[in-house]
Image: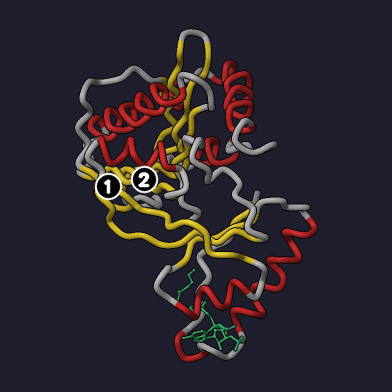
Amino acid sequence: MGFFGPLSVHPRHWDGGIAHALLAPVMDCFAAWRTTLAGLFTFAESAKHVHLYEKFGFQARFLTAIMGKVPAPAAPVEFTAWSTVPAADRPRLAGECAALTATLWLGLDVGGEIAGVDALRLGETLLVRDGGRLAGLAVCHVGAGSEAGTGTCYVKFGAVAPGPSAADDFDRLVSACETFARTARVSNLVAGVNLGRRSARRVLVARGFRTIFQGVAMHRDDVPGFSTPDAWVLNDWR
Ligand SMILES: CC(C)(COP(=O)(O)OP(=O)(O)OC[C@H]1O[C@@H](n2cnc3c(N)ncnc32)[C@H](O)[C@@H]1OP(=O)(O)O)[C@@H](O)C(=O)NCCC(=O)NCCS
């Protein structure tokens, strides 16, 4: 899986072919990496953006809602914070995380993001268990200097494994994010969800998340990836 962005051209040079020139090598990278699921998030209302990306084989699919709420968990939920995991246990846990995300898309592994958030102190990764099983994970950015910005906790990537307990696991994962956001003393919890993930979206709405703004996910060759009704995933390709 690969996604790109932000892509930005100085307004003085708009419509001069610079985005085309920038995108051609991006497509070369995807080809060299043998990327099977490639996508981006863009402005749904912009005919220019949709036209530009269509020329590179991307199709507009579902809207992606960037949603937020004041964190207030119905009941605090137990989770493990990655930063508290002893170094000796991290490789095993990283393997569990990779196994979970691989259920969404073969080979998908956000281990680099988990390690990066930890090393750069951008936020925290939350792990929710169901007995001995890793049920879900959420990579969160927190505050100024991160992708969240001041006063905000932003779920960069969150997921639970598919299966009969997925709905409960997902609800607990969102609770864990709210619990963590409160302890981090931020006033906003923000998460993106593709509207193709109908069940996940319904949980956010039921828990009081409101859409702040929305864009459209464009997928190369119209490959749905993990933006399907049964995918319990929070991310928005920004
Ligand atoms: C979006 C952006 C990156 C495009 O860069 P650019 O260098 O102007 O793009 P290009 O000149 O390579 O291509 C623009 C294409 O859109 C077309 N276009 C322009 N206005 C259009 C419109 N209203 N409807 C349809 N097509 C339109 C142009 O004709 C051109 O296509 P063509 O080569 O087939 O004729 C640039 O406008 C930008 O930086 N915007 C602000 C930041 C942003 O929105 N980033 C993207 C976030 S996903």
Residue under the image location 39 percent in, 42 percent down: 155
The answer to whether marks 1 and 2 mark residues whose Cβ atoms lie closer than 8 Å is: yes
| Vertical placement of residue 228 versus 180, above or below | below
Residue under the image location 38 percent in, 20 percent down: 79
The kind of residue tagged 1 is Gly
Give how far across and how far down residue 222 sits, in percent: 63, 58
Cα distance, mark 1 to mark 2?
Answer: 6 Å
Q: State left or right for residue 122 relative to residue 87.
A: left
Give how far across and how far down residue 39 sits, in percent: 59, 58
Q: Nearer the viewer, residue 231 or 88?
A: 231
**Which image quadrant for residue 191?**
top left
Q: Which residue is mark 2?
A: 191
- Secondary structure under tag 2 reads strand
| Vertical placement of residue 94 versus 223, above or below | above
| Vertical placement of residue 89 versus 138, above or below | above
Give how far across and how far down residue 13 sits, in percent: 52, 90
Residue under the image location 19 percent in, 41 percent down: 70
The kind of residue tagged 2 is Ala
Name, please, the residue furthest toward the top. 131
Whichever of labels 1 and 2 marks the residue nearer the N terminus, that label is: 1
**Which image quadrant for residue 81?**
top left
Q: Nearer the viewer, residue 208 or 120?
A: 208
Q: Residues within 10 Å of mark 2 (few under 14, many from 20)?
A: many
Give how far across and how far down residue 18 sits, in percent: 60, 83
Q: State left or right for residue 216 relative to residue 25.
A: left
Q: Residues within 10 Å of mark 1 (few under 14, many from 20)?
A: many
Q: Which residue is mark 1?
A: 68
